[in-house]
């Protein structure tokens, strides 16, 4: 399984480009899905309102719609709501995770910039002396990068 090295700039930029490409390609699908979901929500609202009006006897379309029609409408409404609500909850969780990932990447980038700017951190030979776990990871990564450059020479 390929993992994302969030301290490696090319890896992070590749992930962001892939993400942008995916969202650009999916924009038309997303627009179509939004329209479909809008129509679906309107249909469920109309069905729900009709069922509520029928339940409280505010609506009587006896010659046009029989009891069997109302039962079918109720089943249709319940089945659609049963499948739509979990899908919408899952989509909301996915959006929250994406926002959290982007916020985490920004925070890590700022920590890495701080590590590079702060001379005391770079002079420390022991990553254990550093306070923040993320700064320790950044320091270990920078040391490995420096060692790799020395080996290439």
Image (cartoon, helix red, strand yellow):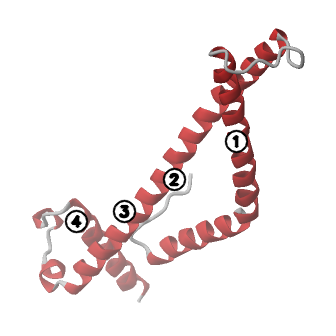
Q: Disc count in the image?
A: 4
**Would you identify the image quadrant in which residue 39 lies?**
top right
Q: How busy is the neighbourhood of tag 4: few (under 14 within 10 Å), some, or many (20 plus)?
A: some
Counting residues from the start of the chain, the first of labels 2 and 1 encountered is 1
Counting residues from the start of the chain, the first of labels 4 and 1 encountered is 1
**Would you identify the image quadrant in which residue 142 lies?**
bottom left
Between the C-alphas of marks 2 and 3, the distance is: 14 Å
Between the C-alphas of marks 2 and 1, the distance is: 23 Å
| Location of mark 3 (residue) | 104
Between the C-alphas of marks 4 and 1, the distance is: 52 Å
Q: 141 or 43, which lies in front?
A: 43
Query: Is disc 3 placed on a helix, strand or loop?
Result: helix
Q: Residue at x 14, y 81 (%)?
A: 123
Q: Is residue 71 left or right of residue 95?
A: right
Q: How busy is the neighbourhood of tag 1: few (under 14 within 10 Å), some, or many (20 plus)?
A: few
Q: Residue at x 50, y 71 (%)?
A: 11
Q: Residue at x 22, y 60 (%)?
A: 133
| Location of mark 1 (residue) | 42
Counting residues from the start of the chain, the first of labels 4 and 3 encountered is 3
| Location of mark 4 (residue) | 136
Q: Residue at x 75, y 48 (%)?
A: 36
Counting residues from the start of the chain, the first of labels 1 and 3 encountered is 1
Between the C-alphas of marks 1 and 3, the distance is: 37 Å
In front: label 2 or label 1: 1
Could you tell me residue 75's position as x and y percent?
A: 74, 18
Query: Is disc 4 placed on a helix, strand or loop?
Result: helix
Query: Is disc 1 placed on a helix, strand or loop?
Result: helix
């Amino acid at each position: 399984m390929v993992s994302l090295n969030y301290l490696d700039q090319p890896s992070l930029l590749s992930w962001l480009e892939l993400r942008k490409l995916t969202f650009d390609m999916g924009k038309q699908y997303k627009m179509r899905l939004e329209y479909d979901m809008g129509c679906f929500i309107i249909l469920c609202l109309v069905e729900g309102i009709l069922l509520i009006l029928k339940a409280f006897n505010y609506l009587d379309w006896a010659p046009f719609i029989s009891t069997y029609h109302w039962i079918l409408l109720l089943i249709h409404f319940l089945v659609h709501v049963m499948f739509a609500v979990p899908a919408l909850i899952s989509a909301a969780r996915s959006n929250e995770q994406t926002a959290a990932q982007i916020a985490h990447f920004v925070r890590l980038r700022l920590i890495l910039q701080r590590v590079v700017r702060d001379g005391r951190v770079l002079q420390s030979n022991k990553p254990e002396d550093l306070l923040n776990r993320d700064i320790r990871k950044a320091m270990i990564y920078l040391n490995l990068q420096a060692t790799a450059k020395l080996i290439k020479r």
